Image: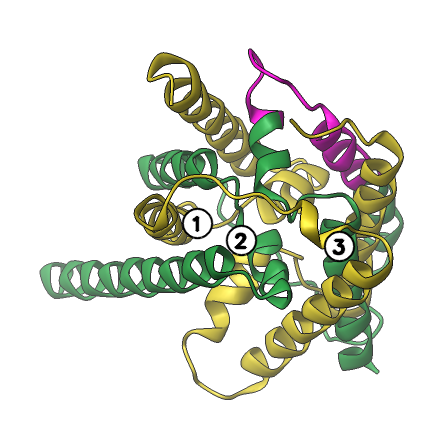
Amino acid sequence: MGKLIVFISGVLFGTGVTVSGMVNPMKVLNFLDISGAWDPTLILVMGAALLVTLIGYQIIFKRKVPLFASFFRLPTSQHIDAKLLGGAALFGVGWGLSGFCPGPAVASLVFGRTESITFVIAMAAGMILATQIQKLQRSKAGQISS
Amino acid sequence: MTEFTPLAGLLGGGLIGLSAVLLMGGYGRIAGASGIFAGLLTLSFNTEFSWRFIFIVGMLIGAAWSGLFFFDVSSLEFNGGPLTTIAAGLLVGVGTVLGSGCTSGHGICGLSRFSKRALAATCTFMVFAILTVFITRHALGA
């Protein structure tokens, strides 16, 4: 049952990013282009998503556990550090260059366009690279402390 | 030019929100696209892999059927050549791993939990994305 919920959630996500037009990089870039031919659609996408999630989370978190899993897996870190901000900045530049963020980019693979495929492969490479660098740093830090 | 499409935007956004609520309420997970996708790249085929895989398959099916009925696929328009696309993909990949999330994980789920980290990350990537578009479109006049 849990897996079915995950599947439905994925379908809703893919439907949402497509129906809203977020899978179209030009629409996203025109939203980010506040001094140009501004398309405010993305504000409504973010606003509606945020409102539904905000209300939904309030209801959900009244329970101690999710319906079909043993616990809520939530990030515990509260720390705003250079890694968080630097990573977000790099992501912002990539988003602004292409108009693609991860969800819509992956969803848009089904439309079979070369740009989507190229972007997702490069994104996967970047993710693997960053994960490896982090592992290396952690093992180095471990050596120093031990 | 792309047209302002408020109804499609509200409907699509509402569905993304519903997806986030369902995944947390049902399975206890944050609906963050970058984290879910990056988790697949470890290729360690355990339960952590399988739920992510199921989510991504669902996402692709969702996009495919909406592309048939609710979205004009021919309106897709991309920016820049292959080098720009590759550079952007690398930046988004590295950035979302270091920054622990993207538009969905930080911008929707994180903000809905009143996470300070998510707020800081969301403000940062929004500002950098807007600046990047401003520089490439207006300052460089490309």
**Magenta stretch: dominant secondary structure:** helix
State yes or no: residue A42 in magenta: yes
Badge 3 density bin: few <14, some 14–19, many ≥20, Cα 10 Å? many
Q: Is A23 drawn above or below residue B5 in the view shown? A: below
> Badges 2 and 1: C-beta atoms under 8 Å apart?
yes
Q: In the image, what residue type sits under mark 1?
A: Thr
Judging from the image, the colouring scheme is: by chain
Indicate the position of residue A27 as horizontal and vertical percent values: 64, 35
Closer-to-camera residue (B141/B43)? B141
Q: Which of the chains bears the disc numbered 1? A: B
> Badges 1 and 3: C-beta atoms under 8 Å apart?
no
How far is mark 2 from mark 1, CA to CA?
9 Å
Q: Which circle's residue, 1 or 3, is located before the other in the chain? A: 3
Q: In the image, what residue type sits under mark 3?
A: Ala
Badge 2 density bin: few <14, some 14–19, many ≥20, Cα 10 Å? many
**Which of the labelled discs sits on residue B96, or is there none?**
1
Residue at the (65%, 57%) spot, across then down: B30
Q: Give the residue pinned by disc 2.
A: A102
Chain A visual colour: green
Chain B visual colour: yellow
Nearer the observer: mark 2 or 1; the answer is 2
State the SS at label 2.
Answer: helix
Indicate the position of residue B71 as horizontal and vertical percent values: 79, 51
Can see residue A144? Answer: yes
Closer-to-camera residue (A140/B129)? B129
State the SS at label 1.
Answer: helix
Residue at the (75%, 70%) spot, across then down: B27
For the record, the magenta segment spans A31-51
Q: Is A30 drawn above or below residue B32 in the view shown? A: above
Q: Which of the chains bears the disc numbered 3? A: B
Q: Give the residue pinned by disc 3.
A: B20
